[in-house]
Image: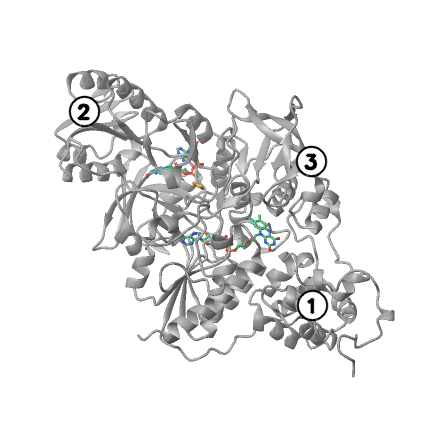
Amino acid sequence: MAKPNQPTQPPAKKSKKAVPMPKQEPKVRARNFNEVALGYSEEQALEEAARCLNCPKPQCVVGCPVELDIPAFIKLIKERKYDEAIKKIKEKNSLPAICGRVCPQEEQCQKLCVLGKIGEPTAIGRLERFAADYELKKGVDTPTLPTSTGKKVAIIGAGPAGLTAAADLAKFGHEVVIFEALHVPGGVLVYGIPEFRLPKKIVEAEVEYIKKLGVKIQTDALIGRLHTIEDLFKKGFDAVFIGTGAGLPQFMRIPGENLGGIYSANEFLIRVNLMKSYRFPEYDTPIRIGKKVAVIGGGNVAMDSARSALRLGAEEVCIVYRRSREELPAREEEIENAEEEGIVCKFLAAPIRFIGDEKGWVKGMECILMQLGEPDESGRRRPVPIKGSEFIMDVDTVIVAIGRTPNPIIQTTTKGLQTTKWGTIIVDEKTGQTSIPGVFAGGDIVTGEATVISAMGAGKRAARAINEYLMQKKS
Amino acid sequence: MYKIITKRELAPKIKLFEIHAPEIAEQARPGQFVIVRLHEKGERVPLTIAGYDRHKGTITIVFNEVGKTTKELGCLNNGDSILNLAGPLGNPSEIQKFGRVLVVGGGVMTAPLYLVAKALRDAGNELTVVVGARIKDLLIYEKEMKNIADEFYVTTDDGSKGQKGLDFLKELLSKKHFDRAVVMGPVVMMKTVSEITKPFSVKTIVTLTPIMVDGMGMCGACRVTVKGETKFGCVDGPEFDGHAVDFDELIKRQRVYLPEERVASVFYEKIGGCACGEA
Ligand SMILES: Cc1cc2nc3c(=O)[nH]c(=O)nc-3n(C[C@H](O)[C@H](O)[C@H](O)COP(=O)(O)OP(=O)(O)OC[C@H]3O[C@@H](n4cnc5c(N)ncnc54)[C@H](O)[C@@H]3O)c2cc1C
Ligand SMILES: Cc1cc2nc3c(=O)[nH]c(=O)nc-3n(C[C@H](O)[C@H](O)[C@H](O)COP(=O)(O)OP(=O)(O)OC[C@H]3O[C@@H](n4cnc5c(N)ncnc54)[C@H](O)[C@@H]3O)c2cc1C
Ligand code: FES
């Protein structure tokens, strides 16, 4: 038996490096929409799983927003008990094939991994994906459903927050209906994150699993317009969860921004991902992409937009970011992928004006150079324009990816719902309880733009609180 | 799936559908719109609600067959279904007693305007209604509008029926005082009417139809400049003050996808169009 905090096997044999993720060649993948990261084979998964030290006091679990029992599932992979491994994961995470692909593990579980102190941490995300893909390939088991409690919960928004809350509430035995405004469930997972990073059939499969739990999903239902929250209670729902996300695109408010060829990242990504315009004219929604594309911003959304533009046939794609490389908020892995594919970055620059041609199409972008000054409220050094450094970039397409704010429709149609000055909904952090009894909220609508896993964590906490609320409430 | 209950052709290439959509019918109000998507590969197309029947659980849309999606829609028949129908979207029309209202409708948008005009009349307004189209064969809702109008005019671009063009509005406005004008139609026509009413200081409400994708405030494709500020047509509108709208920008933005729309239309016809052989 191993002593506490001692590895179960001698670490000497272990490689300091994680088994690399097999990927499509950069030159090839830059022109197609197929998934970039191909996933571990069984051998690779076993090799990587063997690196895990199985710490008795695992730090990785502390770093996971949904407290996945990471060493336990990795141990099951080591033992080739893949069915049990995925079952273990699903105890805490209903969307593992998604999280295994898009979670920023480097800032969460893997950041705290003991192996990380001497080399690369265990590739937890890749192993999670391996187990989830194994199950998807094999066919997902139908879970056993508990007896009905007779309570009804309405979930608004089918993003990761809403889907997670729905799954957990169904497991408690409540009747759950999700109202989703768009024509497909998934939120950012279907309309934002591109196919090459998260294939839509993976999202579909995870949604199917949630439906198997008995959850009903009504699409084309914009709450606030089709029904208000008040209406939902009148229709017999006992509680409501709001998971409407941060889908309102921000613009820079500089001259020329409404010229043709200037998209918000949301419009661009919705056309490409949700409406599949990369397959136009087989699919009906068009997208116009020029030769020289500039993407403004430096987060995951900017990377996804730039890489999509490249795949649509742009000759040059340049990311224009007002700080330096160190401050780029996107995941390191995605920055590397983008650079490998040939995307260039112009750091310390920001647009101040767009120039159009006679038809109203953008043809140039005037920028100004920046230098980093004192840190601002976010702790990052504030970019300060350098006088007289203006220059003009030739562009024919611009994608603005400078941030998204909360969807406002619910807030403006629900009396008594308290919000912050940024439009996010105010809740009790532990429970997701809003200012209205029986109404809970979580995900980006509460925190502003965050991550898939934090939205799921909020959905989980709210589900627990809603369950308690319903069981206490005398009907 | 949303079933088509009634189909009628009102004029060449202009069709009316009554669609079974009880939840939308329950909430719909004049001036709001829906987004339709015909099938798995379809695009999201906004159409204004031209009527609703809460008892029957139906809504009415009237559309012009201008491109791929509307042609395909026009080929559907009674009993066929539409895959997606989202709504009601946008803000309802502002309905109250204003006094004397000038109602101007152009082309296919005359149909949803009728719903607004009826509500305005029911709110106690006196209506002067103008119904227009390019040529006389394309006039729709003439009889219906005439029935609710205190004063009624027809106009065509070529003068084939009624007045020729919109110049006669100047005379009308100089003879009578109007408290408000409500205009729905092609952008160029809304621009012209707004220019005509401006010197008379008659508040003029136009319904803008910028290109939309989601119709729910998530993409910004529908942005329009109103009083120098960027607004989203789908959630801030679709009604705006016609004297504050930058129409020239809107006209340019509507043309952005013209080449692709042609491709879609040609592609559709190449693969055989629809069974009814009209495409
Ligand atoms: C391009 C892009 C890339 C990203 N990449 C990553 C990544 O790699 N890793 C990561 O962890 N995070 C990433 N994120 C962030 C992550 O996707 C979000 O934090 C997460 O999706 C938030 O989940 P949510 O459930 O709160 O909201 P959303 O996913 O936004 O879902 C909200 C849903 O509610 C619906 N809705 C809105 N209003 C209404 C209404 N009134 N009625 C009914 N339905 C409504 C919306 O249509 C939507 O489907 C990315 C985001 C974007 C845009
Ligand atoms: C809020 C709103 C309400 C609308 N209500 C109605 C309605 O009640 N009845 C109706 O017939 N049409 C209405 N429209 C216009 C309608 O949505 C377009 O005609 C339709 O999208 C065309 O699709 P398509 O694929 O058939 O044609 P496309 O191939 O997309 O376009 C064909 C032609 O139509 C023009 N066009 C495309 N989009 C628009 C637009 N948004 N506005 C004006 N012209 C456009 C193109 O420039 C092109 O010349 C409305 C638009 C909006 C935004
Ligand atoms: S249509 Fe997308 S924001 Fe208006």
Eyeballing the image, is B253 above or below B68? above
Label 3 neighbour load within 10 Å: few <14, some 14-19, many 20+: many
The image's mark for residue A347 is 3
Residues at marks 3 and 1, CA–CA distance in whole angstroms: 36 Å
Percent of width and height locating residue A357: 55, 21
Disc 1 C-beta below 8 A from ligand 1: no
Eyeballing the image, is A151 above or below B205? below
The amino acid type of the residue labelled 2 equals: Phe
Image quarter where ligand 2 lies: top left
Q: Please identify the residue farthest to the bottom as the structure is shown.
A: A1
Q: Please, what secondary structure does the residue beneath circle 2 have?
A: loop
Quadrant in the rendering for residue A377? top right
The amino acid type of the residue labelled 1 equals: Gln
Residue holding disc 1: A59
Residue A473 shown left or right of residue A345 in the figure? left
Residue holding disc 2: B178
Q: Please, what secondary structure does the residue beneath circle 1 have?
A: helix
Give the residue displayed 51% in from the left and 31% down from the top: B259
Residue B163 shown left or right of residue B262 in the figure? left
